[in-house]
Image (cartoon, grey):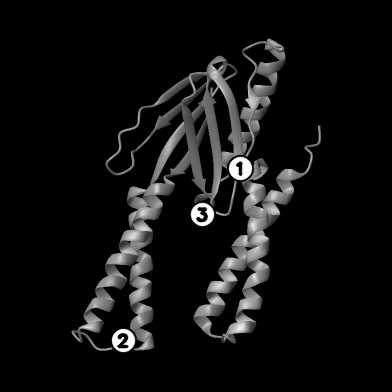
Amino acid sequence: MTNYYIRNTSPLMFFLNVFVVNVIIMGTYYILKINDYIPTLTTLQLAILVLCQFSLVIYLIRSTAIVKMEISLSDQRLRIKWLNQYLFHKIDDYDILFSDIKEYVFENDQNYDVFKLTLKDNSKIKIHQSIFYYNGEFDLFKKDFNEKIIIFNLSNGLNNHSIQEGKTFYETKAAIVVYYVLIAVLIAIPIVIIILQLNWRKPSLLASLGTLYFSSFYFLLLVNQHQKPKQI
């Protein structure tokens, strides 16, 4: 068997860490400020606070939301071994025969490379590798897995053991709906700014607009790429 070592990220634990830390630190700061318990921070002091907040989030994410796993792959089976666990979690290892797999999907977005398995009993397994911890192992696993699935399907012909490649989110009707809604929003924003005469050069607004437009254009690009007919 060939072994691959991947850092798996829990999107839920990731979100909870970011949300809780931001709410606690910024919420405490504003409550103390409103009640005049602390003076207004200078730009330098505020920058230090944000840096400490960011460092704490990174530390908690690394400690509680990211785990190491070993994926072993042979011609007939897939094994997933958890080398450590998420905080307050106990997830069993997996030993899966290819004949028990119904479909699989490899998907990527701004934050994760994702591998999804649907078994014939309709149970699902998901692996999320954060792009910030990219080490090349996921791509090697993806290539090897795809090659072994092709060989497995050819050896079984068109029978009940054939494994299907499922659709990514970007190939679904829901993605198309989001696609056109985003286009409408991106067109409407400049119109609203002009009508309300908002100062779009304000740093906070400019940063928010930059993030929104970058994320939206990336999503639109992914939908366009996945809606194109696959070349055989």
Residue at image position (35%, 81%) is 46
Few, some or many residues within 10 Å of mark 2 (<14, 14–19, 20+): few
The kind of residue on which mark 2 rests is Leu
The kind of residue on which mark 1 rests is Phe
Residue 32 image-quadrant placement? bottom left
| x and y, in percent, of residue 145 in the image | 61, 28
Task: Report how far apart the C-alphas of labels 2 and 3 lie in the structure.
Answer: 32 Å
Determine whether 84 is above or below 146 in the image. below
Determine whether 18 is above or below 25 in the image. above
The secondary element bearing badge 1 is classed as: helix
Callout in the foreground (2, 3): 2
Residue topped by disc 1: 169
Q: Which mark is residue 41?
A: 2
| x and y, in percent, of residue 166 in the image | 63, 31
Please tell me which residue lies in front, 124 or 14: 124
The reply to whether callout 2 and callout 1 are in contact (CB within 8 Å) is: no
Among the two numbered marks 2 and 3 on one chain, the one whose residue lies closer to the N terminus:
2
Residue at image position (29%, 44%) is 87
The kind of residue on which mark 3 rests is Phe
Task: Report how far apart the C-alphas of labels 3 and 1 lie in the structure.
Answer: 22 Å
| x and y, in percent, of residue 49 in the image | 33, 76
On screen, residue 18 versus residue 129, left or right, reads left
On screen, residue 5 versus residue 200, left or right, reads left
In the orientation shown, which residue stands out farthest toward the right? 232
Residue topped by disc 3: 132
The reply to whether callout 3 and callout 1 are in contact (CB within 8 Å) is: no
Task: Report how far apart the C-alphas of labels 2 and 1 lie in the structure.
Answer: 44 Å
